[in-house]
Image (tube, helix red, strand yellow):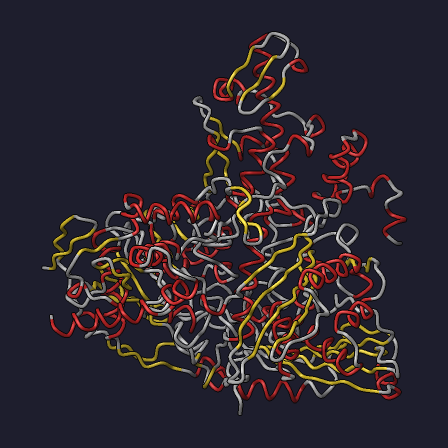
Amino acid sequence: MSRSDDTLLLANVSRRGLLKGLAGGSALLLAARWDLSLANEQSQFGAGAMPGGWVDNPNVFIHIDSDGMVTIINNRAEMGQGIRTSLVMVAADELGANWDRVQARQADGDQDKYGNQNTDGSRSMRHWYDPMRRAAAAARLMLQQAAADQWQVPVHEVRAGIHKVVHPATGRELDFGALAEAARALDVPGRETLVLKSDSELRFIGKESGLINGELKSAYPKAIDGEDIVTGKAIFGADIELENTLYAVVARPPVYGAKVKSLDDSEALKVAGVKKTVRIEGSGQPAAFSPLGGVAVVATNTWAAMEGRRALKIEWDNAPAGDNADYTSDAYRESLEKAAQSPGKVIRQSGDVEAALKQADKRVSATYYMPHMAQAPMEPPVAVVRINNGKAEAWAPVQNPRATREGIAGLLEIDMENVTVHQTLLGGGFGRKSKPDFVIEAARVAKEFEGQPIKLQWSREDDIQHAYFHAASVDHLEAGLDGEGKATSWRHRTLSPSIVSLFAPDPKHKGAFELGMGFNTMPFSIPSIRLENPPAPAHVRIGWFRSVYNLPHAWAIQSFAHEMAEAAGKDHRDYVLDLLGPGREVHNLTVGDGWNYGEDPDQHPIDVARMRRVIERATEEAGWGREPQNGRGLGLAFHHSFVSYTAIVFDVEVGDGGELTIHRADIAFDCGPQANPERIRSQMEGSIVMGIGVALQSEVSFKDGIAQQSNFDKYLIPRMPDAPEVVRVHLIDNPDDAMGGAGEPGLPPVAPALCNAIYAATGKRIRRLPVGNQLQPS
Amino acid sequence: MINLTINGQQHELDVPDNMPLLWALRDVVGMKGTKFGCGIAQCGACTVHLDGVATRSCVTPVSAAKGEITTIEAMADDAVGQKVQQAWLDLGVAQCGYCQGGQIMNATALLKKTPKPDTREIVDAMAYNRILAAIERAADEEATS
């Protein structure tokens, strides 16, 4: 059924009609919207399908002191995406709070109380926007009721203003603070009685602020942690200060799965400040979130612990690691490239690709490689844990406090109720801190020091050598074109180790959630399509890296579409718009994607019209089609991920010696309704910079199972001269569709767009990442 | 015993000569604004001023930190530092914020030396030159101490 048919049904007015309905002030739409929104959230999709679900009780999230200070409890991890500010803005706006009298408090890990707290998948705003607005609207109604009770007037006669409730008939007013205690004692009103503010009443939600494409339009509203950050007062994981703390670092087996064969710690124990060494059992495989094992050195400060670790003499036993000890990434790439020549498990099929390829006037074929990468958050993993009388207390920068509690409880064989996890700010996450292995490691050490806090610090070397690596990927594509250059067939084989290998015996094939990241959801309209997934084993810990498998899929598909356009002799933009076909909604189930980032495909289909719109916007803004100058070129790529749409155009120049200058990036982004446009812009800007690293610099290679890079001297990430001279973010005004993610979808198209621009500038096709020195004259 | 002057205050520390200033600040003095990012003077999260020069504290042994040490904690009371902090807030510069103390220390040192830097000077100062200078300085002082 097409979308236009759906919208005739009241039940399908849904979220897509939500903001439209609010703007129009239509009671009917509002009512319909509530029913549907709640039904959805209680269904198998969206926030309601997440462990712990959603909570919209105002008493859980909003606290007002008698002096009127409003405290909003933030239940999501803050790792730079700005969720502490953005979710607080949402609640404060709906409540009617004065921004100068609002503060945030971070929730401890408690999914039963706060709903889902696993901050990944670009889900925080799209899952918590509605519950937070409802919580705030309920709190506002309770304040109104408290005022009406005090004034002994009907509640419909009072109105909520900014941080106060007023009785217009008599001119009486009371500050939120004066009403807080009475309001708290009232019953929470039923959801059906809540009326959200109309768009015209909003002060923060959806409002542009801050730096917009290089121009300061208005000062950014005081970010929740802004002042603490610029003055050095913000508390990250390692900044927790507890009395009597001991400091630990761990020597881990260089090869995944290896164990300590012998240990001589005599020299280490002589280092001033070193107290003790602790053997940590190896996790075995699959490791999941368990520590890798090794030897911890515990000392009176971090430096002494590091010096002690340097003095350890450890012999490792690689036998338990099996063939991981033979893992060499170059050979692995070659083996995957070879495997890509043979058919694999069929994931999606329409038409007869083999026949169509044989009949094609022209065939295009290419193989792409993306290496392992480490998330390398600026704050390396770190945790503080104290164990006392059968209870554990942890302070840590974790994306998933629930998994952290479970892991510690499992290790200590105690009830999860006896584990408290305090979430600090995260100095970046990028998926690394979804895995709480480093906190469980700290708990393991703390077990030896009853009552004493252990601060376990990972060095940068630890972080890069023992990451949960982004899967190395080979993607082999072949297409058949007719005499006009039009695509008649498309065959794509994707090969990379699966994250499932972290939790279960290695399936050697990608799971549904991995294929659904831009592989089977590929939206091109081509008569014959065959998508295959040949096997690829895992030899290192494989884990989430910002935007995950969208990275290799977008890199391969978007590079290849450009190669097809070149083979057809067509303009790249015109060609891909033709490949996409007319605007339409592709239901995920019709392409074999039953996952869809956990969202309802009726609400979040693959919307080709939205894809086309971001492509058109980015190319227009970039001046697509202008005469290319010598050594200069424009490159385009686009991608649908986390139920949002992104297109990007790079303008680059390559000098005779291969020096790359990125003059400009134009990124167009459609996530539907925008709660805090300023932070969406900053996510796009950050995605561009991170994507430049993915394209040009970042690689962890392996030899004999050991990571060959260990710090920022060899594992390169972008620095100031690598950033584009100009970045322009073009947000698509689209309040009518359902809200999508913003933290990750900016990243996938960056690398292919940059490589396509390099091709336009030089004629040099990049098929293996990172670009590294491939642009230098040979 | 090592004597350090941090933000105008004297501190006497019982630490080995080779302990990097970073860990002395964080673990011994208890000042957490200066951050650990890489330990090899690559990222700049640990930047402090040593006699006004932006210096990577992670590779500066306490024995070489003879002079006025200034950290991010003192920038709110520094005329130039204050301006940089306010500009950071106005533009919403910080994302996770972990390295921003170091960035602000670097930027403040640049502006004190070059009040109106051009783009090239900013890129150079923030990315490369000062790292070199800091390492060389630290190395020299270590060798002669």
Q: Is A545 located above or below residue A492 in the figure?
A: above
- The residue drawn where x is 31% and y is 51% is B33
Q: x and y percent of residue A349 in the render? A: 82, 74
Whether residue A421 appears in this view of the structure is no
Q: Quadrant of residue A581?
A: bottom right
Give x and y (percent) for residue A673.
68, 46
Q: In the depicted view, which residue is nearer to us: A270 or A632?
A: A632
A474 relative to A89, above or below: below
- Which residue appears farthest toward the bottom when viewing the image? A778
Please identify the residue farthest to the left as the structure is shown. Answer: B1
Looking at the image, which is closer to me, A247 or A564? A564
The residue that appears at 53% across and 89% down in the rendered structure is: A777
Q: Is residue A156 left or right of residue A263?
A: right
Of residues A437 and A563, which is closer to you in this image? A563
Q: Residue at x 32, y 81 (%)?
A: A315
State left or right for residue A628 relative to residue A79: right
Residue A456 spot, x, y in % from top left: 34, 60
Q: Is residue A72 above or below residue B33?
A: above
Seen in the picture, residue A75 relative to A295 is either above or below; the reply is: above
